[in-house]
Image: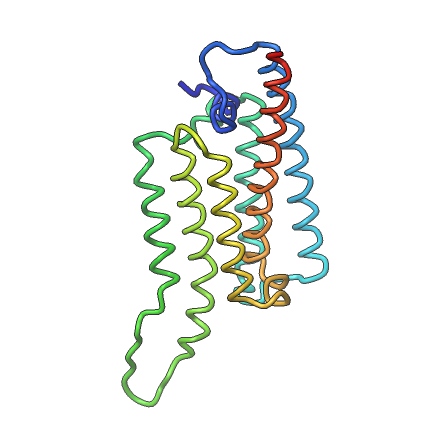
């Protein structure tokens, strides 16, 4: 049973929760705390640079500060889980009775990304194209979050599969949007930042497994 976020991370990185090397587990926990601190630093620098030099999202200007505050709240909750604050891990932990949320995220994201035909009557013609471009950004984010949560329910191969999915999503975004549009969108640039984090997880995955095998010799 994953009682703490460290149990979750231990399984995510492919280690057995039952038994194992106690000294290695302690090093693993200390290393993951440092790694999370680095992630917080990177996200903080990213938000500072975006707000300082871009100012607001090109596609959805009104969502910029709402988005930053929402991400900040989520990061605070995860940080409390790393500090083993009571109730924090339970609020974000994956569980069987929350799988409907993952499906809801994926379905909602797909609906926002699909270009349904639009029929209008009369001469008044709203800017449907602009509305679609606005909705597709949160749609991509919702679809991606739902997909990653689904992957994390697996009992093995979580980190490699997440890295593979992140590369595919990143490639799709780079094919659809020019770089200058990505840098001016807080949604798109943050999605790429998340995906870069999953690639970094893969490097860390190989590092921990090398350390584990070295400790067994």
The mark total stands at: 0
Could you tell whether 145 is left or right of 85 in the image?
Answer: left
Q: Residue at x 38, y 55 (%)?
A: 109
Q: Position of residue 25 (x, y in %)?
A: 58, 15
Instruction: State which quadrant residue 36 falls in.
Output: top right
Q: Position of residue 164 (x, y in %)?
A: 49, 45
Q: Residue at x 36, y 86 (%)?
A: 124
Residue at the extreme front of the image, as rendered = 217
Residue at the extreme bottom of the image, as rendered = 123
Report the quarter where the N terminus lies.
top left
When the figure is inspected, residue 121 is found, relative to residue 36, above or below; the finding is: below
Could you tell whether 183 is left or right of 62 in the image?
Answer: right
Which of the pair 23/75 is nearer the observer? 23
Report the quarter where the C terminus lies.
top right
Q: Position of residue 134 (x, y in %)?
A: 47, 66
Q: Position of residue 104 (x, y in %)?
A: 32, 47
What colour scheme governs how the chains and residues are painted in the rendered image of this protein?
rainbow
Q: Residue at x 56, y 38 (%)?
A: 75
Could you tell whether 8 is left or right of 214 in the image?
Answer: left
When the figure is inspected, residue 33 is found, relative to residue 27, above or below; the finding is: below
Which of the pair 51/43 is nearer the observer? 43
């Amino acid at each position: 049973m994953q009682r703490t976020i460290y149990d979750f991370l231990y399984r995510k990185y492919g280690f057995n929760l039952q038994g194992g090397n106690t000294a290695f587990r302690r090093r693993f926990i200390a290393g993951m705390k440092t790694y999370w601190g680095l992630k917080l630093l990177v996200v903080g620098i990213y938000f500072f640079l975006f707000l300082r030099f871009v100012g607001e999202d090109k596609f959805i200007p009104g969502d910029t500060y709402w988005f930053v505050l929402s991400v900040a709240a989520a990061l605070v909750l995860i940080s409390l889980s790393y500090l083993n604050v009571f109730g924090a891990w339970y609020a974000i932990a994956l569980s069987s009775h929350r799988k409907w949320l993952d499906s809801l995220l994926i379905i909602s994201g797909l609906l926002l990304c699909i270009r349904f035909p639009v029929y209008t009557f009369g001469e008044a013609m709203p800017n449907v194209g602009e509305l679609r471009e606005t909705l597709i950004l949160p749609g991509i984010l919702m679809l991606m979050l739902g997909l990653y949560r689904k992957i994390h329910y697996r009992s093995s191969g979580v980190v490699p599969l997440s890295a593979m999915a992140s590369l595919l999503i990143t490639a799709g975004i780079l094919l659809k949007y020019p770089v200058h549009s990505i840098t001016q969108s807080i949604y798109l640039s943050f999605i790429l930042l998340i995906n870069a984090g999953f690639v970094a997880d893969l490097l860390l995955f190989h590092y921990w497994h090398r350390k584990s095998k070295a400790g067994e010799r």
